[in-house]
Image (cartoon, helix red, strand yellow):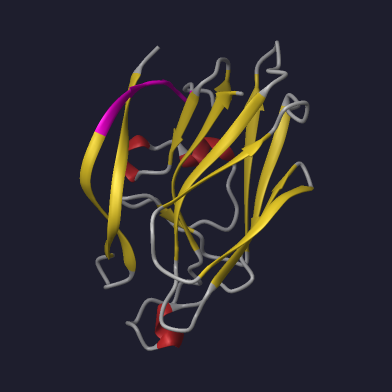
Amino acid sequence: MLLALMLACSACTHKNNTPGFTMVGSKISSIAMLSPDGVISSLPVLVSFLAKDAMVAKLSPTGLSQPEDWGTWSAAKEVSLHFSFANPLPSSAAITLNFHPFVAGDHLQTFEFLWNGTSLGSQTYRENKDVSLSYDLSGSIAASNTLSIKVPNAAAPKSLGINDDTRELGIGIVSIEFSVK
């Protein structure tokens, strides 16, 4: 099992003054990383969305911007990520999403999280903050899975008068962890 660096982040700015992250601390945790072929063969496993880890492309993503040093912004009204699990499939598992909502002034963010088309839940965020959100996936993991995140309030920082960034930002994903429940 590899050692992975778990980042503790705080709100800061993207190179264009877009809210993002900067590392302010870290902790070392014993956790496997996503395999080179993108298949999850054991739990727990951490899927990093940091540019330096180059893991995002293994998930056949849609609705994401390019990975950055702190993580990856959504760039559409919906994000889809595909996760493959090797046999035997875990019968009892949880997913933890570590992210940052793009909130500016009165512009709120609401996210709906779906696993293989079934809603896990919906959350509304009124402030820029680091979020760690977990859901029980017990009994719902197949060999091939899709995590969808609906981002109906995605907005370009330019449209909100923040800067010239025209990407439709909503959720800034830092990592996703699968663990035994």
- Quarter-of-image position of residue 109: bottom right
Residue 45 in sight here: yes
The residue located at (54%, 18%) in the rendering is 43
The residue located at (79%, 47%) in the rendering is 117
Q: Is residue 132 left or right of residue 18?
A: right
In this figure, what is the number of numbered marks? Answer: 0
**Quadrant in the picture for the C terminus:** top right
Q: Is residue 91 above or below residue 70?
A: above
Verify whether residue 29 appears in magenta.
yes
Q: Nearer the viewer, residue 51 or 29?
A: 29
Residue sticking out furthest to the left: 24
* Chief SS of the magenta region: strand
Verify whether residue 81 appears in magenta.
no
Span of residues in magenta = 27-34
Q: Is residue 27 left or right of residue 137?
A: left
Q: Is residue 16 left or right of residue 107?
A: left
- The image shows residue 113 at horizontal and vertical percentages of 66, 52
- The image shows residue 170 at horizontal and vertical percentages of 51, 66
Q: Is residue 98 above or below residue 101?
A: above
Residue 69 in sight here: no
The residue located at (48%, 68%) in the rendering is 169
- The image shows residue 59 at horizontal and vertical percentages of 57, 38
**Quadrant in the picture for the N terminus:** top left
Q: Is residue 11 left or right of residue 97?
A: left
- The image shows residue 72 at horizontal and vertical percentages of 42, 53
